[in-house]
Every structure is written in C-alpha cells, then in structure tokens.
Amino acid sequence: MVRKLRSLSWFDSREYYSFARRSTLRAQGLTRAATEGKPVIGICNTASDLNPCNRHLTQVSEAVKRGVWAAGGFPCEFPVISLGEMFLKPSAMLYRNLMSMDVEEMIRANPLDAVVLLGGCDKTIPALLMGAASANVPAIVVPGGPMLSGTFRGKTLGSGTDGRKHFDLFRSGKLTDDDMEELECSIARSSGSCMVMGTASSMALVTEALGMSLPGAAAWPAVDARRYAIAEQSGTRAVAMATHGPTPREVMTRPAFHNAITALMAAGASTNAVVHLLAIAGRLGISLSLDDFEAISSKSPLLLDLKPHGQYLMEDFAYAGGAETLLQNLLPLLEGDAITVSGTTLQAQLATHNAHEQSVIRSIPNALDSDGGIKVLRGNLSPNGALIKTSAASAHLLTSRGRAIVFESKDEMLEKVNDESFHVEEDNVLVLRNAGPHGGPGFPEWGQIPLPKSLMLRGISDVVRISDARMSGTSYGTVVLHISPEAAIGGPLGAVQNGDWIELNVPNRTIQLDLSPATIEARLAALPPRKPHYDRGYGSLFLQHVEQAHLGCDFDFLKYKDQ
Ligand code: FES
C-alpha cells in the first residue's frame, strides 16, 4: 500500500503557512524542482564534539544524503542530544530517556516522511530506537561502527576490556606513567565506538537482528568505506520506506525481539542491552520481561569469540562476515519471517549472504558454550531480578558463599579498593549499593567494583561483586548487577551489613542473603530517610518517573499507550 506523505500537510496546501514554509526552502537556494512532492527524509544526527565516538557521523550523514538525493528524496539533517559515555557525569544513562524524548518529538513535530537515525556510543542507539518507536514514522538506523583494533607493543587491544586490565597492572606497579601514556595513544586509533562486544557494538548487533538496519550495518569499522556505502544505501532505502513502510511498529514485533535477544545471547553481549531492549519493547506495547531473556538465553549457544569474553575484536567480526554470518548460523533458532527495514523477511535477507571459512563466528554444533551467558538471578536480595554475565565470569565463583564487605558509595569503594591495608579475603563478597537509577543517580556503570589492591598484589584476579549498578559492556568478572529493587528505594540490598553471609548459586539462579525476612525488614525499617539527589529540573523529573532495572528504566509516562 502506498502511504500519503506526511510532509504534504506542511507544504502542499493553499493556506498561508504552506506558502511561508516553501519560501523558507527557497531561502536556502532550493528550487521547487529540488523539493516539490519529494519525500522528506530526516537524518537524525548525534555527531558531537562532546561525543568522540559519534563525531564522524557528520561524514556518514553526507553519504546518507547522497543516497536520498539519488533516490528522489529531499534530505534534511537535524541534531538531537548526543550522549558521550566517556564525558557525561554522573552517567550517560541519566539522559537516555531525555534524548529519546528529543528524538520522538523532533520526528513527530517536523515534516518528515521517514528518518535515518545515526548513532553509535552506548546510549545513542537505544535512545534513537525508543524515540523512533514512539513516533512510529518509518525509520532506519545507521550505526557509526566500531573503532579500528587497538595495538600496543605487538599486541591487539580492545577498548575498555584491555584498558581496565592494563590499568590494574598500573595500579599494582607493573606499568609506569610512560607506559600508560603510550597505551593512551594506542588503544583508541580512530573514530567510532568501543571495538569489543561492549554496549555500543551489542546495540548495533541487536538493531540489525531486530530488523532496524540494513544487512551488514552492525560491524564494519567506522572508517571502512563499506560503512559509507551502507549509509548511502540506507538513505536510498528510506525514500522507498516513506511511501511503502515498514514503520518501526511493523518491524519491531515480538518475533523481532526474539531474534534480537537470540543474537545478543549468541554474541555474549552486554548486560546493558537487556535494559535497553526492555525499554524499547515498553515503547511498543510489547510484553517483555527478564524471564524472556532467561528462556531465550538457555536455548542460545554462545557463537561469537569476541572480547570481553573471547579473543577477537569487532574488526575481526566484520571481516568474518559480521551480523549476517552470525544470524545465518543462528537461523534455526530465529523467527525468520520477521520483516526488516529492507522490505523482506530476515530469512530472505540472509539467503543471499555468502559466509566463508573463519574462526570468529562459530556454528551451532561448534559453539563456545551451550548457552548465552546472561543469567537472571532472584532471591531475597533481588526479588525482581538481577543479572550476571557468566561468559565473562570465573567458573569457580558461580557457586560460592562468602561474607559481605559493604560500600555505601562509589567514593567509599574507590578509597578502600586502592588502600593496600584494606583487608579482603578472596572469598569475601564485595557489595556496592546506592548505585541504581535513584541511588547513582542515573544507574551508573560502577558495578565492576575494581579489585582491591591487596588482592591484586596477592595475584587474585576475581572475587564475587554485587550491586544495584550496571557495568560497562566491555567489563568482565563475577559481577552480579541490576539488583532490583535498588537499595535507594528500600530494596533488600540496603539491609546487608559487613560480615553477613551471601550465597551465589548461578546454576539455581539465586542470590541469597543469609538472614530471616524479619531481620531484613527490621534493618530496612531502621535506615534513616534519604534525601533525593535533585529537587528541581530534569533530575527531579527523572527521579519521579524512572522505573527500575527489571522494567528497562524508562519513564512511566513514555510507555506505549493505545490511542
Ligand atoms: Fe562510546 Fe564506548 S565510549 S562506545
């Protein structure tokens, strides 16, 4: 069915404002022939000097424009808030929902017939998808792509993952200031997002599996010519989508979420993608819960050998065939009939992909592990759920019991872990609280509590760590995250005291504080009242409306409503 262009109601009437709007196009030197009756394709750009991972999207946008003009459309680039993971305090996550509102409102309020969404750094693709889902104007995502692999003294390095490992060597005196300066110049060699299977790469992969980007869009490096070719093709495709769809609601269906979660698990990807997928589904009225992730994880073999759990990087993934090869290998587990932005089914789209011999992306019979590596834990410490990424954890700690050492804040945690005299045993359980959506505030990535210096000096490389925070997708270790409800709103994590026994049993999917319900309740009742972090502005809106981790941390008023 051919859809009427939305933009006609802005430009094609006999009322005064249509004339006035057209005159502003003439003011740009655009002739009637260049614009009249053409689909207006928005290019929603998150390029920003404050977001180095997305800075090159200005060039990507030029390639999209080329594709739009060539297909007979009229491209209009517009900026939205950009969230740079490295610069924003206290956490880019505090602003994901704000950015999604910017995206939604700018798409809806402007004369756009379709939109190309340019994102990359962790929160930008989730916010683009959330906003596009709510606006429901045909949309296609072009991820910015990962950086080139890092190289340092003959070794290949992955951002975040190897950065943290080398920083721990620096903390324990094995690397000097000069070494670190050389490393600083070697680990981030080009524009683009972190090049391990961190959150940015996970969201690019999930987007392709959801059907919201063209085949091959997830993995090509930011500087690879093929990324610019996909950008051009996406611009061309958006022109066709303006009149023929599909819309985000037609693409992001429940089967599409099944495909996205299967790909996420097969990639051993970021725990953050769980929160973002829950939020995107919430914008579409699709019922999705942590139980869906657990169920799909248990049936999805781990196929990608990428850091942080494996050995390769995103560049290797791209050269090995990228998301197309991964999805092709996963096809027996996927909903192949799901429609994608290419206008065909996922199965039809994958049928033309020629996979070749390589060792980065495994086949199902040759899987690295039998399941996807993200597990949902429940118990009296996390009644609404918590996550652990077992693919990046130490096997010997997955069933363990230890006494708690509690940190009330990030500052206390950093002070103690860096103090050589801070006494910790390898079977202690490190607990960080007040780091969730309310507590952080903004659900920061503090969950990979750094190993205490005293343990590192003894050669111990992992201990059980639990928190109501998130962790970077580039992180690793036996880390229990996203405990819900969080301590700051009265969750049971607030009741833990130093010396309490905590039992982690991943095979049974439990995390348990060894105290009676009455004791937990009495301790929580005795806690002093908390002062909120904000009493005005966006921060105050965030605290009033943000939901907990197991629901995706969206604002309650942004959820899908049948109108
Ligand atoms: Fe932007 Fe990692 S800091 S993707």
Image (cartoon, rainbow, N blue to C red):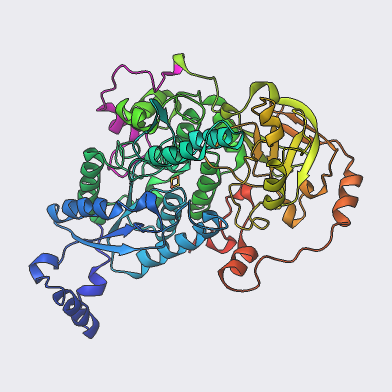
- In this view, the residue in front, 88 or 181, is 181
**Which residue lies at the image location 64% right of the left edge and 27% below the top edge?**
461
Question: Quadrant of the rendered structure where residue 145 is?
Answer: top left
**Which residue lies at the image location 59% right of the left edge and 61% below the top edge?**
556
Residue 174: give x, y in percent of width and height: 56, 30
- In this view, the residue in front, 373 or 184, is 184
Does the magenta stretch mainly form a helix, a strand or a loop?
loop
Regarding residue 229, the answer to whether it shows in the image is yes
Question: Quadrant of the rendered structure where residue 498 is?
Answer: top right
> Left or right: where does residue 369 sit relative to residue 428?
left
Residue 234: give x, y in percent of width and height: 25, 47
> Left or right: where does residue 71 sit relative to residue 361?
left
Regarding residue 2, the answer to whether it shows in the image is no
Residue 125: give x, y in percent of width and height: 42, 50
**Which residue lies at the image location 67% right of the left edge and 50% below the top edge?**
410
Question: Quadrant of the rendered structure where residue 504 is?
Answer: top right
Over which residues does the magenta segment extend? Answer: 337-364
